[in-house]
Amino acid sequence: MCSAPIRPSEITPEHAYLSRRRFIAGGAALTLGGVGARALSEDWLTGRGFRPGAPIEGEETTPIEYATAYNNFYEFGTDKDDPARYAHEMTVDPWSVEVTGEVAKPGKLGIEDLLASIDLEERVYRLRCVEAWSMVIPWIGFPVKTLLDRFEPTGSAKFVEFTTLHRPDEMRGQRAFFSGIDWPYVEALRLDEAYHPLAILAVGMYGKVLPNQNGAPLRLVVPWKYGFKSIKSIVRIRLTRRPPGTTWNMLQPREYGFYANVNPSVDHPRWSQASERRLPSTLFSPNRIETRMFNGYEEVASLYADMDLRRNY
Ligand code: MTE
């Protein structure tokens, strides 16, 4: 699937060039809120192009039909097939993202304008869910830092909070009486974590724009952390001085820490984190593999050099 021929981003198609011009010309509109918000059409990515990424050596990319049918997106229900079944009820056109808090230039921008002059690249990453299953997914996106820098974080910014769309009319899980979650879904990173080059905002996967169930049109992907940190369908980003409250941590602080770094030696209170089921996995062929520290992304270790990762799970 991901071996389909892809257009490198060096070849800038005309309309991308034009929208880049629009972004530059519209620089002052950064504080004008949602002007001309438009969605990312199916062929938006084909038009834009992206730099292809390298596969992970020795690990197979998960077939697209697993990555788009076995999901966690509680806004649409708690079963793994609920998001694929119901996420089409979410309107992603128009879509805008607001950036507020400790930034010199707060603003709200339509998704197309927000992305207009950002180069896209493919990153093939492991995704390790806290529930002890994992996949290998070819995302298309860009470093979180690229977006944050646009809004000029102030010297007081220490954390970045991300918020998912809150629209109970279109998200049946948000209407569900028993969900227990205090919507909207919120996640956060320390600013230095968000600035790490491995942390990306994704707009596509498998060479196409993100399907709704995977967090269209814009989601976070932090490959060294448990999947719940990789928040979907983002509408607001807020830079803060203090650690923001995050959905799973507020719900079950003993089970889901703020850091949530993949760590095979710190078990979840109800199950071991030493190994994982790499999908596709069946009863007869479970495909169980050992979980690696930081999900195999050891280059992030310096972010936590002086921290006790047992206490800061
Ligand atoms: N984001 C929102 N808004 N709501 C969610 O329920 N689930 C998280 C994360 N992001 C979730 C979310 C969890 S637990 C995981 S494992 C990943 O999304 C799953 O991403 P995927 O469905 O694209 O594999």
Image (spheres, rainbow, N blue to C red):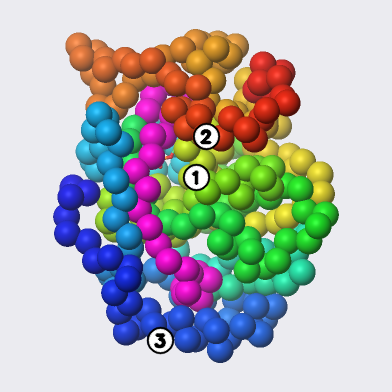
Kindly identify which residue carries mark 2. 299
Q: Amino acid at mark 3?
A: Leu
Q: Are marks 1 and 2 in contact (CB under 8 Å)?
A: yes
Secondary structure of the residue carrying tag 2 is helix
Q: Amino acid at mark 2?
A: Glu
Question: Residue 80 location in percent, x, y?
Answer: 38, 33
Secondary structure of the residue carrying tag 3 is helix
Q: Is residue 226 visible?
A: no
Question: Residue 157 location in percent, x, y?
Answer: 77, 53
Confirm if mark 1 falls within 8 A of ligand 1: no
**Marks 3 and 2, how far apart in space?**
37 Å
Residue 129 versus residue 37 in the image, above or below: above
The one of 3 and 94 positioned closer to us in this rendering: 3
Say the numbered circle drawn on residue 242.
Answer: none
**At 26% across and 15% down in the image, what residue appears?**
286
Kindly identify which residue carries mark 1. 198
Q: Is residue 213 left or right of residue 250?
A: left
Residue 31 versus residue 218 in the image, above or below: below
**At 51% across and 11% down in the image, what residue appears?**
271
Question: Residue 293 location in percent, x, y?
Answer: 50, 22
Q: Amino acid at mark 1?
A: Leu
- Answer with the quarter of the image where residue 91 lies: bottom left
Kindly identify which residue carries mark 3. 18
Q: Nearer the viewer, mark 3 or mark 1?
A: 1
Q: Nearer the viewer, mark 1 or mark 2?
A: 2
Q: Write down the region rendered in magenta.
A: 111-134
**At 43% across and 82% down in the image, what residue appears?**
19
Q: Is residue 53 left or right of residue 225?
A: left
Q: Are marks 3 and 2 in contact (CB under 8 Å)?
A: no
Q: Earlier in the sequence, mark 1 or mark 2?
A: 1
Q: Earlier in the sequence, mark 3 or mark 2?
A: 3
**At 69% across and 47% down in the image, what residue appears?**
191
